[in-house]
Amino acid sequence: MTHAPHSLTLADVARHLGATLSGSGETPIRGLATLRGAGPDQVAFVTSRAYLKDLAATRAGGVLLHPDHGGSCPVPRLEMNNPYLGYARLSQLFDPLPSRDRAGIHPAATVADDVRLGENVCVAANAVIEAGAVLGSGVVVGPGSFIGADSQLGENTRLHANVTVCHGVVVGKRVILQSGCVIGGDGFGFAHDGSAWHKIAQLGGVVLGDDVEVGSCSSIDRGALGDTLIGDDVKIDSQVQIAHNVQIGDHSALAGCVGIAGSTRVGRHCMLGGGVGLSGHLTLCDGVQVTGMSLVTNSIHEPGVYSSGTGAMDNHQWRKNAVRFKQLDDIAKRLARLEKRRG
Amino acid sequence: MTHAPHSLTLADVARHLGATLSGSGETPIRGLATLRGAGPDQVAFVTSRAYLKDLAATRAGGVLLHPDHGGSCPVPRLEMNNPYLGYARLSQLFDPLPSRDRAGIHPAATVADDVRLGENVCVAANAVIEAGAVLGSGVVVGPGSFIGADSQLGENTRLHANVTVCHGVVVGKRVILQSGCVIGGDGFGFAHDGSAWHKIAQLGGVVLGDDVEVGSCSSIDRGALGDTLIGDDVKIDSQVQIAHNVQIGDHSALAGCVGIAGSTRVGRHCMLGGGVGLSGHLTLCDGVQVTGMSLVTNSIHEPGVYSSGTGAMDNHQWRKNAVRFKQLDDIAKRLARLEKRRG
Amino acid sequence: MTHAPHSLTLADVARHLGATLSGSGETPIRGLATLRGAGPDQVAFVTSRAYLKDLAATRAGGVLLHPDHGGSCPVPRLEMNNPYLGYARLSQLFDPLPSRDRAGIHPAATVADDVRLGENVCVAANAVIEAGAVLGSGVVVGPGSFIGADSQLGENTRLHANVTVCHGVVVGKRVILQSGCVIGGDGFGFAHDGSAWHKIAQLGGVVLGDDVEVGSCSSIDRGALGDTLIGDDVKIDSQVQIAHNVQIGDHSALAGCVGIAGSTRVGRHCMLGGGVGLSGHLTLCDGVQVTGMSLVTNSIHEPGVYSSGTGAMDNHQWRKNAVRFKQLDDIAKRLARLEKRRG
């Protein structure tokens, strides 16, 4: 479904992936596709048993798969122990975006005089970069994106279009910020005087580690005093809200629509499902997984999988059960009473 | 509350709506309003029985209503079997936006040389349109909006301000994209090597059918290999997240804050309430409705209304019941034991 | 962690806060920090008992605290009955943002000829302001922000970068709009003709009172006919969705990811926790609090705290209980039967 800007042979691809080639390596390869969709100039892949049924009929130029799955493959094979990882590397080979970047500052961009730019920086039309900002080599700033005063972007970081990085934000290397996300908006802090709210100026910043990705329209708020801290290799999906002074440990992944309240600390290698909510001032240890749309209101000190809520059912049944939920304490007490009377 | 740029008579309005006029058609009409708020140069409407109580006292120049409801109307009537549809058509007649569009490319816009533009295209200040994009006749691109390389917009499609359409996105005719939405950001795909994440380049696109609307700050991610597909006449509210390779059938409507995980397929004429979450790789058949904030983790094969969760109650009561929820399996087993002992 | 642009003495700070100084007032103060982090030129603060343990070891130049907590303070004290309020005022004193604003219109901004501007208005690069807009004195419009035709911004209101204020929106004084938020996108209104949707043009506007704050990537939709109304001193966090014709009373606070459906009215001094959902056409009286991720489907007429849902637990336990939830009505009936047989 995609085609590389340049042509490779299957043997080139095998070398790039560190895969073991089985069959002819001379086939020219110009893209990748699913087993069903691939033509003779594309590589397909088998990343789980579920796809094996499509293997025999594939017309792909080569198939990337686990050594155990190669038996019935009708075309040359690229064997790897982790073919899903191979697919990831292969996909990057055929990504058209990097070849489109043009180094330099577009004449319709606005860059303050004292901004420090590394080599091969690309700044697109209508981007605005304020005083004191520092952009490492290979940074790409998409159209309409904004970088506030004194913020820093590490090497090879990419801001897509219409991204906002507020002032005093530190972004690591190879970070990807999708369109519409906002890094460093004010945290939500107010003091109440008995009748009205008084804003607490949010004087901290945000630090994003290396290899972080932030999805479309997500927001990571700046700290009240200290910084909001996102570790290395943290992957954040679209529509996520991370409040002030939250800390996320390295290699954790947050699916779409997650919301994390202020000062909560999430460990390393955690995974939060779509729509999960974490209350403020909690600690989640390393290796915690929370399933979709669960609400966590207490700290979690043991790795494992956690959940809340009730699965969807027919609305008519649900109404009857949801009413009973409101009687649940009463039901439990009546049951205990009956048990007691039985002796 | 609104006034048309031009003056119409009540008879003109009746003709425009295909309504049956009852009473004088000469009243000049310059806008529409509620029964209570309307003055003599405005049309009011009755779209449900609940509003009939306000009918007798209305000062409107005319009232749009169902033939069965006209009895006590003190002013000229516009009768239609679907007055809510009439209200929709009437509202468009008085929308001030289209009259403000000025065809042409604003001097502060940045449009690549090879972009193909139909007739009467409007490109506002600070919009950026990349190489290879195709805009049909009557397309409006709002201030600060971005259209990526090779994307296509069908006739009479409107992007409000600060909209992002990434590269390789196909948008149908008469589509409306509200401010801040992002179409075609990367899907959330990573392979894990046992210690770190590796990005899967998102090589697919997004296809929006004709007459789609996408709300403010919503995001529709591009596909991993194939495209994310949004059918004709699909209406998507604000703050919605649609993940990669999701498919939504024609005429479905998604309320605010909905989140749909990757590769899930929603049928035609479905309705998802506010905050609904759908897990990945599910299929919802045609005609499914899901009520607000429900989580769906299994495919649904029968049309109907589905729900999950528990309704809000006093926090003190809720705490007692929520604790019991954690004992529910135990409660059920104890009950079964008691029943058995009863014989 | 922050330093003021100008130097103050501790006595100056006491005067500014209206605090009672105890100890020498001559210490120069250049910022504020936590008890643990503060150096001798910074003020620290004790806003709750939980921090008292850090008091004895602080190196701060002065500590802001309640008169009851001053006993063991090793450094000069600033005593106030509401030290959290004092912290808020102090934080504003050291906010670097206002000192960076430069009055005037950036040459890369696009401002329509007939826009009315008060004194000391700042319009940053790539901002776009359409015809008929009115900006009060001291208004700051950040880079890439858009103000639609005929909208009004009261004195000293600040739009951060990439904010969208659509046409016909009225914004009060001292309002703060964080990056990526959208005020006045179309509400979600469609009439169904039995097979397809017909858009209802959203002809109302949005009115934001004085001292409102709206967080990053939040959206407040314009009314269908009348306006969406946000009262004075309403604080709205990031990723919030407020639908058409909602009304929010003065001094209410909405945490991140809240969603409010159309025409619902929230009273004064209400607090909605993160991820709360309110159905449409409800009324919440003054003083209602709803805890995180609760769904409210009925009006609330008594002040108090309300909740729904179930707390997170180990996934294995949860699965067993969630299955039982679907049997809850049956469980309740069986229990009643047993009770009856007991007589």
Image (cartoon, coloured by chain):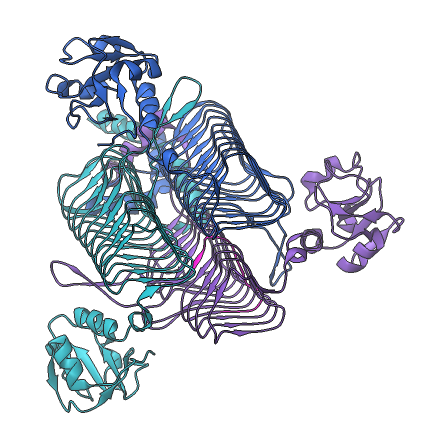
Chain colours: A cyan, B purple, C blue
Using the rendered image of the protein, determine whether residue C45 is visible from the camera's viewpoint: no
Q: For the point 79% across and 55% down, which residue is it?
A: B13
Spot occupied by residue B214 in the image (x, y as percentages of width and height):
50, 57
Instruction: Identify the magenta region.
Output: B171-182
Relative height, residue C302 to residue C225 (above, below): above
Using the rendered image of the protein, determine whether residue B205 is visible from the camera's viewpoint: yes
In this rendering, position of residue B192 left or right of residue B133:
left
Spot occupied by residue C121 in the image (x, y as percentages of width and height):
50, 38
In this rendering, position of residue C223 left or right of residue C2:
right
Q: Is residue B180 magenta?
A: yes
Residue situated in front as seen by the camera: A153 or A307: A153
Spot occupied by residue A292 in the image (x, y as percentages of width and height):
30, 50
Residue situated in front as seen by the camera: A63 or C98: C98
Q: Quadrant of residue C179?
A: top left
Rendered-image quadrant of the N terminus of chain B: top right
Rendered-image quadrant of the C terminus of chain B: top left
Relative height, residue B210 to residue A176 (above, below): below
Q: Quadrant of residue B42?
A: top right
Residue situated in front as seen by the camera: C96 or B314: C96
Q: For the point 21% across and 55% down, which residue is it?
A: A154
Relative height, residue C112 to residue C37 (above, below): below
- For this orientation, the residue located farthest to the front is A113
Spot occupied by residue C43 in the image (x, y as percentages of width and height):
23, 21
Q: Is residue B78 magenta?
A: no
Q: Quadrant of residue C64?
A: top left
